[in-house]
Amino acid sequence: MQNVHDIVRPGGEVFVAGRGIVDLEEESRHKALAKVIATHDPDNKLTIGRHKDTGEWVLFLRPKANPFGIDAPYPLLGMGKELPSPELIERILVETDTRRSGDKILNDITAANERVRKPARSHADEAIERLAEAAESYMNAHGQTPYYRSTRNLDLKNRPYRKDAD
């Protein structure tokens, strides 16, 4: 029987039938990530692997859980070219868990949108105020007003029932 150290290449790689050359360190980190995913996904719908087209590490939806009826894993979230750490995967799974923290996620999105919209809204409000003031100033300068006047009409021709003006 051959010693395992004789089979392993100097870079920590080994040839596995059906898979080719496998990096043992990467394989052990991949198993650690699978354990983290299993703790946060009791339905066993998620898995992590390399995307065949881009080479990125991706969080996939397993084929049986795929709502689109496709018999291939559906990519959900890209993690980059390097294999992510278990802490990063755990943080991402906790942050994106809509079942447990959907309200918090929605509140965070709403707050972020509000922060983006607030400066634009204040500029628009200022512009509307300046426009309203300019329109009112123009109308007043030309003897018109957008408001109903409740002052007394002292012109006698408009009040035939009164003999004298007040």
Image: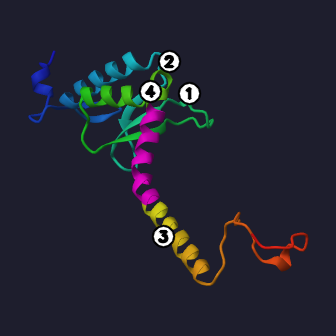
Residue 66 picture location, percent across and down: 57, 32
Residue depth check, mark 4 versus mark 3: number of the one nearer the observer: 3
Residue 16 picture location, percent across and down: 28, 29
Residue 13 picture location, percent across and down: 17, 33
Residue indicated by mark 3: 130
Q: Are marks 3 and 1 in contact (CB under 8 Å)?
A: no
Relative to residue 115, is residue 153 depicted above or below? below
Q: Earlier in the sequence, mark 1 or mark 4?
A: 1
Residue indicated by mark 2: 43
Q: Amino acid at mark 1?
A: Ala
Q: In this view of the protein, which residue sits in the foreground, 143 or 74?
A: 143
Q: Marks 3 and 1, how far apart in space? A: 56 Å
Residue indicated by mark 4: 97
Q: Would you say residue 87 is visible in this rendering?
A: yes
Q: In this view of the protein, which residue sits in the foreground, 86 or 135?
A: 135
Residue 27 sits in quarter: top left
Q: Earlier in the sequence, mark 2 or mark 4?
A: 2
Q: Are marks 1 and 2 in contact (CB under 8 Å)?
A: yes
Q: Would you say residue 17 is visible in this rendering?
A: no
Q: Marks 4 and 3, how far apart in space? A: 46 Å
Residue indicated by mark 1: 65
Q: In this view of the protein, which residue sits in the foreground, 163 or 107?
A: 163
Residue drawn at x 43%, y 63% is 123
Q: Amino acid at mark 4?
A: Asp
Q: What span is in magenta?
A: 105-122
Q: Secondary structure at mark 4?
A: loop
